Image: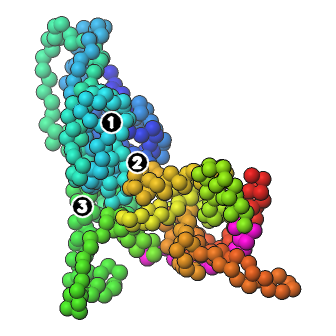
Amino acid sequence: MAIEIHLPDIGTDSTDVTEILVNIGDTIEMDTPIIGVESDKAAMDVPSPKAGTVKEIKIAVGDSISTGTLLLLLDPADDEAIATEADTAEGKQKPAEPVIVLREVSLPDIGTDEVNVTDILVAVGDVIAQEQPIISVEGDKAAMEVPSPHKGKVVETKVSIGDSVSTGAPLIVLEVTEQPDIATPSAPVATPPVARAPVQQQVHQSVGRENSFVENQEYAHASPSVRRVAREFGVNLAKVRGSARKGRILKEDVQNYVKEALRVVESSGGGDPLGLLPWPEVDFHQFGDTEEQKLTKIKKLTGANLHRNWVRIPHVTQWDEADVSELESLRKKLNKTEAEKESGIKFTMLVFVMKAVATALQELPQMNSSLSVDEKTIVLKKYVNIGIAVDTPNGLVVPVVRNVHEKDCLALIQDLRELSSKARNGKLTKNEMTGGTFTISSLGGLGGTAFTPIINAPEAAILGLSRADKKPVWNGEAFEPRLMLPLSLSYDHRLIDGAEGVRFLNSLKESLKVVKEELQTL
């Protein structure tokens, strides 16, 4: 009888299949990775809980699956078949009594090698629900809460605030009540043991050929986490030899490839892979007193991302100004009314611009697109999620306001207030920092007249706002003072040409007039 292998609970409602790691006819061991999946929270491999031979694969790359989805059918290994026959011969068993067991909850794969524990959200003696957050962690990419995969009573905590932990590290111990599927048979079925082939022989039969060198990295045998590392280093996986089973590429293989590439470049006197001169090493202390401060994790990650985006994306920046004289007068009037009502609501120019940007993005969808990794496909998004750059004590972060095109100004005010507070307190989750389609960086509260914002890949554009200022504007008969808001639009020239950039800014300015008309009805 074939064994059904289902997707276990991996801590997310839905996940996408990125790889099928086995083929029909493969003989696999227990815990052999069978598929790669990627969700909003992390990318990971899903192991098989059983050994056997792959009989049928029920899913395909690109499928969206959830807990319990049937993945594949296995013909059981010899000992599994014996157990199945024994169960059949014994007949239907009585349900066993619930048992109390101790379950150790470990840190799942959250897409980063190491994170720091920032908060313990449960205590010994607490009774918690499945998916209830148990600890908060902060890594290079984001701060997030880790949920429990089980419900039960906390009997021990294994970590402390400030600990550095990695995937698989024990976090807590739970006392869990479980209901076994069947009772233990009263008498074992006497079946002679069947000799199993050595693992090495099974692997040999499964592979059956040498690891072939692939020219297209799409066909390289690597997990999503390894592919992510390769993308960060800019490595074509087709050029990396895998050291694992079936020629599978490990993270160490990519790291060794990068080290060797750097060694070759250095030995040839090329400076670095981009052909640049090495960074100058200067003893600054010889010129006077100095102080060294370590970069925060957020600053290190932001710096690496900004450097990559600036080098790899052909930026064009378009500057313009929007007349916001009437809009600013209306904003002050609305805030005065809200202050009298003591509602706590405060209208800002940023909220008005967000509404206008959402309208302009729907009129010009190319600005709301992304270029595929192989640079052969444009992805046009039907939704508008706007990232807002927030300056925090630890560095720049970009929380994302979702579905801006469906919300009014009051809803956006509430979203911005919550996200900004979380950002400054280091409480943003990974989900609140992903999924953006366009970014706004506002420096109007600080000053300046214009700047060149760097695109937040894989988005196509970013809008910078500087301080609005009174300027003389010709009205056809005379100059009159008008409040002008500087706009700095950077866009990916591979996706957007100059004419489209100008059209977007023109659409944005017209949309601000519509926002003003809508606000007048409040």
Taking the spot 28% from the left edge, 21% from the top edge, the residue there is 177
- Distance, label 2 to label 1, CA atoms, is 14 Å
315 drawn magenta: yes
Local SS, label 1:
loop
Local SS, label 3:
helix
Range drawn in magenta: 311-328
Q: Nearer the viewer, residue 445 or 375?
A: 445
Q: Which residue is mark 2?
A: 41
The furthest residue to the bottom:
287
- Distance, label 3 to label 2, CA atoms, is 25 Å
- Distance, label 3 to label 1, CA atoms, is 32 Å
**Which comes before the other along the chain, label 3 or label 1?**
1
The furthest residue to the right:
477
Q: Which of the labelled discs sits on residue 148, or is there none?
A: 1
- 499 displayed left or right of 24: right
Residue 91 coordinates in the image, percent (x, y)? 28, 7
Q: Which residue is mark 3?
A: 253
Taking the spot 63% from the left edge, 59% from the top edge, the residue there is 347
The quadrant where residue 473 appears? bottom right
122 drawn magenta: no
